[in-house]
Image (cartoon, rainbow, N blue to C red):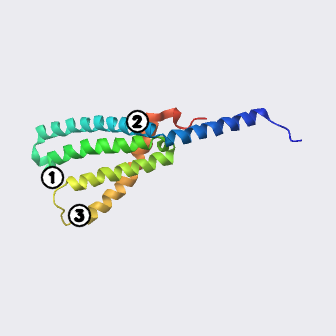
Amino acid sequence: MEEVRWGSSIAEIRVAVAALGALFERASRRVISRRVISGARWGFCFGLALDVITIVVFLIGGHGVFAENRITVQGALFVYTAGGVLAGAIVGACRPIVRRKAGAAIVGVLVGLLIGSLLEAASTAPDADHAKRIFVVIGMVIVLGASCGLIFREIAIGKDANPK
């Protein structure tokens, strides 16, 4: 007869129960919608903070500051507000994925692509360097998006990121 090790069996049962609980949690529409709404609220707050900074920059520098970067004040306000809400909703929906480092990096890149797309849509007419700029923006999104995702993970989740 095989020897039973109670310590390891109990640990395996705990892992299985935790995995089963996580599976049901992911399947719950109520939980997912709460995550999305909570994330969208946080994103809205961050967007509002950036809107305040945008208005201050506009009051100090005028339209010229924005024209140099091929965007209007209204476009910047739109990107920060809408981008904040949408990015927050994505992060909220992907909350279980963000607990892992690779997941945080991937979600960061997705959010970066969203913000980059909104910025490009809000910018004025494309110029001769449009294709080069898109290539540079995609490269920046991959590097900065992944970095920001990992930073967010450490700040928001911290030691609870990898439960034992």
Specify which label sits upstream in the sequence, 2 or 1. Answer: 2
- The answer to whether the residues at label 3 and label 2 have Cβ atoms under 8 Å apart is no
Q: CA distance from mark 2 to mark 1?
A: 40 Å
- Viewer-nearest of labels 2 and 1? 2
**Residue in the image at 74% along x and 36% along y:** 9
Residue assigned mark 2 = 34
Quarter containing the C terminus = top right
Report the front residue among 67 and 123: 123
Specify which label sits upstream in the sequence, 3 or 2. Answer: 2
- Viewer-nearest of labels 1 and 3? 3
Report the front residue among 22 and 162: 22
Q: Is residue 71 left or right of residue 106?
A: left
The label on residue 68 is: 1
The kind of residue tagged 3 is His
Q: Residues within 10 Å of mark 3 (few under 14, many from 20)?
A: few
Report the front residue among 15 and 75: 15
Label 3: element kind? helix
**Residue in the image at 11% along x and 48% along y:** 64
Quadrant of residue 130 within the rendered picture: bottom left
